[in-house]
């Protein structure tokens, strides 16, 4: 079966990706492969293109150069390839983006029902599993506005998990949270990582990176400057810019 | 039976003159009293707020047609013999002041509370707080809605026909009764209204867009 | 002034007036319902990728908003028969009210849709939902909630506008009032009374709008 | 204002319809014209006064009179008993032959034939009153703002018949030659001048004036000019419509 | 002259002040005296009533119990006493509250002209002095939106100074600012303090408190829990709640 064949083939592969916003060159010749089960932490200064990169992976942004392949499907402008990729890849945003007019449960079952055509009862059962996993099952019937930031972000993670994606993209999932709530979200993500989820995570939580990342990727000015295992990356960064950046973050924490 | 010639067009334009005059009367009178309504509506005085709220509810809850009628003949009925012009001016002023008062109340309340507090902390008093600090900001916020109402008012002046004003719509009706071509005449009348209202609407939309980019 | 107010003519014909009130409310509700539908469909059309469709919606909105309702209803009544579409006065009134209210509703609802944070759409896309599904399940309800106050005050105006439908002989409150006035020449009494009736009608409408809002937008926001 | 007041100020303020040719209307030059205007002018002259016209709409002619904005109304007012409870009519000065008009190929010979069909009338007009009385319960009567809309409704097929006055024939012919005709006469309705109830001075002055122009042929001239026909015979009295103040 | 007599009498005195928002008891029996030239730093957890306290001093809020006296004028509901107090006391807000439709210069001359009846030329001269002092004279003709946060806050300080108040109230003047701008505003305030301005300042900038405060006042749940000289206050807080609070702030900084 091709499935088992590709177990060691990359789940996500970016090759020579170039992206422009108008005339602004936001991503420059980006190459990145993520194998199944790998956890990547993406870091870099503000404006370096981290968000752009992960948004390109599920086609929230179009690329102009190179190719992006997810589970063997090459992402083109065709609706079908976009659908296929989005079904395999879940995404969690900095600002949660829960739907305010739906309860947490309704947030979770919307896509399984509409996209996968799942029955309501089935979708709710799935949702309960994942809400349990992020430990907010007791909040299922509340509306987003009734939850704390940390609970909202965990609900957003559960919502993405309900589509049972093969990989998850996180864009600074803790940076809009009050300090007390950061930990509960990071713990949830660590749990996911332990269970073998493939993850690309933009974050500056270096403790998290040390604990779970297989590789840390450092971007600046739209390019990947350097990547490596966390221990090596943090102890002995190769590039001047990486050193400057790490110096700055560590000073703040 | 007449056809639609230069005479008829000229007659319509004569009507247009009154349309414009009525609009101006309503807008200016309504502007002055609307300001008072807006101030009373946002005042600390509870009774003032209540009364203006009732006033606004009545004028926003009844057709302009009825307002014109009730004011025009009601005033006469209680024994005041007033000129038609004055009656219409009063009716449009009352109508417009309720709407503009409500629009500007919204504008005043949209100015952040900190502005009033800062002004108070500087020792400014109510008239200066309003005139120098709050109203200039409130008018800017309320400009698109104000222009929207102006368009509404232009169209609304057509109802002054009930008290005998031969403004654009009524002129159209008269011409249509002479020429027996209501369709053509009303198309023409509609076109004239459109040519006056549309530029205003576009201007309002532009102000709104500007306001939105400014607040981003 | 020698004139003595005598409301007995109004009281005598109260049943007729109340039926007329019901007719006015009926016209208003039908007009509002259709206007809402036109509003939503119009917003969808305005957001479509088909340029002529967008242009048509814009033209429709601008023409309606910048001409008096009287002219519009005349057209529906007298011009449509020329292309073979003959509607009775009540149907004409409803259609004219719906078109008029719809044009305003398009603009109002569009504002609400524009105010939806981009992140909501992106979250929908990331979950694999399609554009239509996102509009239907994610955008529509919060957008309507945002604009609900403007929409309902527009609908109150629509209710009051039904009085103009008397021009094409539709049966509603103003036409009955004019009939009673013509029969009896009791102008003051009639007009005072129906002004009051309109006030009651719009008060009722506002009450119902409040109720609808409480029932359908019952989710909390910050 | 009383007659004496009017004499003091030197003019009579006359309410007239603004848009009901050929009775009373504002012509394209913005001047009052028509049968009512000519009679009004003659009335003012008979008193040695100037006439000032106030153009009114159907909806506001009564209030204008009642609130004293005008002294008298020559405003194409059909005389009915019901209305006479509110205003004081003078003796009749014009007669209005009202008929039902319809397509030539349709058989309409009486009120009975109107059952179940749509009939248009100008709102608050004499045709309205007559048709409502005759067929109000069987036909569906649509009341339009004015003659133009009423005629347009017939032309566009929105109604199958209309109630009209003696001028409708010409107008229908002009719009669609040979397609429509007068079907049957409804009634002859008489127009009288209106004054405030109880005001003897005005009522008497008008009646005196009307008697005079009926006798000296002046009415005949004016009538011929606008109505293009002879003055009809006027009844000495109408049931429940007093011509003089009691 | 009473003026010189009262040189050592309190400039601001609160006695047994009680304040309710509806049924919520926001200030409880607050006693505080501020002598001329004294600098007070007010701190305490969120919701403890710090803003409420200083807003009461210039009657942005009414009190229901006790009395507030400023320069011998007892603050009552009478317009005259409120006017007198507001003329003596300047206030600077967290969110600057500059008037957006007026230039910085116009912001500065409005109150002197309207309240003191000063001539325009005179008011502008005064404004120039204070704008110079907060070092933004070159920005005088710009509108608030064209300035950085730090510049805006300094403009707000200059605007308050233009009324030549005897005391200044600051409500978290730096907490809406980006970190780079905090220092320029603090420096301005330090300068003011050096020149002998009487100040009550709500802030959590403990460095500032150490450097300029004569007394630090700690509030919790609407009460003044403890007060003292900064060195003593920080080294050896008497109350458990003060210790807990200080522990928390210092951990963050
Ligand atoms: N829609 C857009 N249009 C134009 N430029 C954009 C757009 N989105 C992002 N950019 C620009 O592209 C660059 C990269 O943006 P991106 O959001 O990917 O940075 P980032 O690394 O995520 O930064 P941050 O840490 O601040 O989130 C920035 O210079 C940004 O201004
Ligand atoms: N206008 C108001 N109406 C009702 N309650 C209020 C009002 N203003 C403040 N409060 C309440 O009074 C209490 C004290 O508020 P205050 O703003 O003085 O606190 P603070 O110490 O300044 O807090 P922070 O550090 O968060 O600014 C809080 O519980 C607050 O919720
Ligand atoms: Mg980013
Ligand atoms: Mg505070």
Image (cartoon, coloured by chain):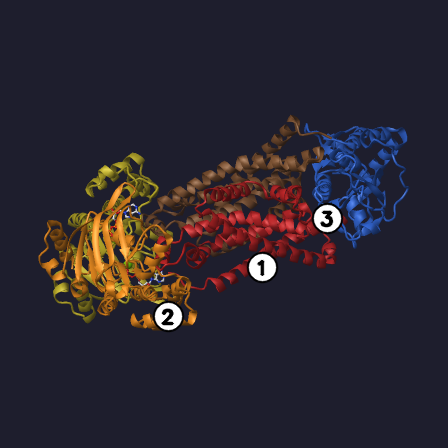
Chain colours: A orange, B brown, C red, D blue, E yellow
x%, y% of residue A38?
A: 21, 63
Residue at 31% across, 49% down? A62
**Nearer to me, E30 or A96:** A96
Residue at 56% across, 47% down? C100
In the rendered image of this protein, does residue E54 appear above or below residue E195?
A: below
Which residue lies under the disc numbered 3? Answer: D142
Which residue lies under the disc numbered 2? Answer: A140
- The numbered disc on residue D123 is none
- The quadrant where ligand 4 appears is bottom left
Which residue lies under the disc numbered 1? Answer: C204
Q: Say if mark 1 contacts mark 2, CB within 8 Å.
A: no
Label 2 secondary element: loop
Q: Could you classify mark 1 by the number of other residues whose Cα lies within 10 Å: few (under 14), some (14-19), or many (20 or more)?
A: few
Would you say E122 lies left or right of C95 here? left
Give the farthest residue toward the left. Answer: A236
Q: Label 1 marks which chain's residue?
A: C
Q: CA distance from mark 1 to mark 2?
A: 37 Å
Label 3 secondary element: strand
Q: Say if mark 3 contacts mark 2, CB within 8 Å.
A: no
Q: Inspect this view and state whether residue D191 appears.
A: yes
């Amino acid at each position: 079966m091709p499935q088992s064949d590709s177990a060691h083939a990359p789940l996500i592969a970016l090759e020579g990706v170039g992206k422009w916003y108008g005339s602004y060159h936001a991503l420059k010749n980006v190459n990145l492969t993520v194998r199944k089960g790998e956890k990547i932490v993406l870091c870099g200064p503000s404006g370096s293109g981290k968000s752009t990169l992960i948004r390109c992976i599920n086609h929230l942004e179009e690329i102009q150069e190179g190719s992006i392949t997810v589970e063997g499907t090459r992402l083109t402008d065709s609706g079908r390839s976009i659908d296929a990729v989005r079904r395999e890849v879940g995404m969690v945003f900095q600002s949660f983006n829960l739907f305010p007019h739906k309860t947490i449960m309704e947030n979770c079952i919307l896509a399984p029902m509409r996209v996968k055509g799942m029955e309501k009862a089935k979708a709710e059962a799935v949702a309960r599993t994942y809400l349990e996993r992020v430990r907010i099952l007791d909040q299922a019937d509340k509306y987003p506005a009734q939850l704390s930031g940390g609970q909202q972000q965990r609900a957003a993670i559960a919502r993405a998990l309900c589509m049972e994606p093969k990989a998850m993209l996180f864009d600074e999932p803790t940076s809009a949270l009050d300090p007390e709530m950061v930990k509960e979200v990071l713990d949830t993500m660590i749990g996911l990582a332990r269970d073998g989820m493939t993850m690309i995570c933009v974050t500056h939580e270096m403790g998290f990176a040390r604990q779970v990342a297989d590789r840390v990727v450092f971007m600046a000015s739209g390019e990947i400057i350097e990547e490596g295992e966390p221990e090596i990356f943090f102890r002995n960064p190769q590039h001047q810019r990486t050193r400057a950046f790490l110096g700055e973050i560590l000073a703040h924490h | 039976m007449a056809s639609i010639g230069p005479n008829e067009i000229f007659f319509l334009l004569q009507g247009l003159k009154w349309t414009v005059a009525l609009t101006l009367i309503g807008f200016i009178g309504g502007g002055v009293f609307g300001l008072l309504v807006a101030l009373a509506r946002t005042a600390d005085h509870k009774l003032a707020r209540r009364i203006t709220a009732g006033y606004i509810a009545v004028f926003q809850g009844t057709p302009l047609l009825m307002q014109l009628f009730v004011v025009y003949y009601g005033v006469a009925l209680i024994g005041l013999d007033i000129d038609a012009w004055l009656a219409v001016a009063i009716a449009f002023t009352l109508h417009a002041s309720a709407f503009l008062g409500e629009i500007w109340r919204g504008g005043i309340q949209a100015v952040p509370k900190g502005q009033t507090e800062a002004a108070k902390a500087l020792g400014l008093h109510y008239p200066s707080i309003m005139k120098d600090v709050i109203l200039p900001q409130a008018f800017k916020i309320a400009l698109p809605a104000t222009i929207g109402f102006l368009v509404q008012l232009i169209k609304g002046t057509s109802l002054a026909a009930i008290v005998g004003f031969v403004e654009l719509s009524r002129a159209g009706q008269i011409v249509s009764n002479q020429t027996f071509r209501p369709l053509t005449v009303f198309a023409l009348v509609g076109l004239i209204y459109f040519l006056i209202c549309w530029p205003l609407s576009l201007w309002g939309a532009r102000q709104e867009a500007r306001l939105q980019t400014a607040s981003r | 002034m020698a004139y003595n107010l005598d409301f007995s003519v109004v009281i005598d014909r109260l049943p007729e007036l109340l039926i007329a009130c019901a007719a006015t409310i009926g016209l208003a509700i039908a007009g509002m319902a259709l206007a809402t539908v036109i509003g939503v469909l119009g917003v969808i059309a305005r957001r479509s990728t088909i340029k002529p469709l967008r242009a048509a919606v814009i033209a429709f909105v601008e023409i309606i908003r910048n001409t008096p309702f009287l002219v519009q209803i005349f057209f529906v009544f007298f011009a449509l028969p020329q292309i073979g579409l003959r509607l009775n006065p009540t149907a004409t009134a409803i259609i004219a009210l719906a078109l008029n209210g719809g044009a305003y509703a398009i603009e109002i609802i569009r504002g609400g849709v524009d105010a939806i944070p981009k992140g909501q759409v992106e979250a929908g896309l990331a979950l694999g939902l399609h554009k239509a599904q996102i509009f239907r399940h994610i955008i529509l309800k919060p957008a309507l909630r945002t604009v609900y106050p403007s929409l309902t005050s527009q609908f109150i105006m629509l209710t009051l506008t039904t009085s103009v439908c008397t021009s094409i002989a539709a049966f509603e409150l103003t036409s009955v009032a004019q009939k009673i006035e013509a029969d009896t020449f009791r102008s003051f009494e009639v007009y005072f009374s129906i002004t009051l009736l309109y006030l009651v009608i719009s008060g009722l409408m506002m009450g119902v709008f409040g109720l609808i809002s409480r029932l359908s937008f019952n989710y909390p926001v910050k | 204002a009383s007659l004496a007041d009017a004499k003091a100020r030197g003019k009579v303020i006359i309410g007239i319809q603004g848009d009901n040719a050929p009775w009373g209307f504002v012509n394209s030059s913005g001047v009052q014209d028509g049968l009512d205007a000519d009679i009004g002018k003659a009335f003012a002259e008979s008193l040695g006064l100037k006439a000032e016209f106030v153009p009114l709409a159907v909806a506001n002619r009564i209030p204008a009179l009642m609130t004293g904005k005008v002294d008298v109304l020559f405003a194409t007012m059909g005389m009915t008993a019901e209305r006479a409870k509110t205003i004081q009519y003078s003796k009749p000065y014009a007669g209005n032959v009202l008929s039902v008009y319809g397509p030539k190929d349709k058989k309409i010979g009486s009120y009975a034939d109107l059952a179940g069909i749509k009939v248009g009338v100008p709102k608050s007009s004499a045709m309205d009153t007559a048709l409502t009385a005759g067929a109000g319960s069987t036909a569906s009567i649509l009341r339009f703002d004015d003659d133009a809309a009423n005629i347009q409704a017939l032309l566009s097929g929105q109604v199958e018949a209309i109630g009209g006055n003696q001028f409708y024939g010409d107008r229908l012919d002009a719009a669609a030659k040979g397609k429509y005709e007068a079907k049957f006469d409804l009634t002859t309705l008489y127009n009288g001048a209106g004054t405030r109830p109880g005001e003897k001075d005005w009522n008497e002055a008008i009646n005196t004036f009307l008697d005079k122009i009926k006798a000296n042929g002046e009415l005949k001239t004016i009538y011929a000019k606008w109505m293009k026909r002879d003055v009809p015979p006027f009844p000495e009295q109408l049931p429940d419509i007093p011509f003089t103040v009691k």
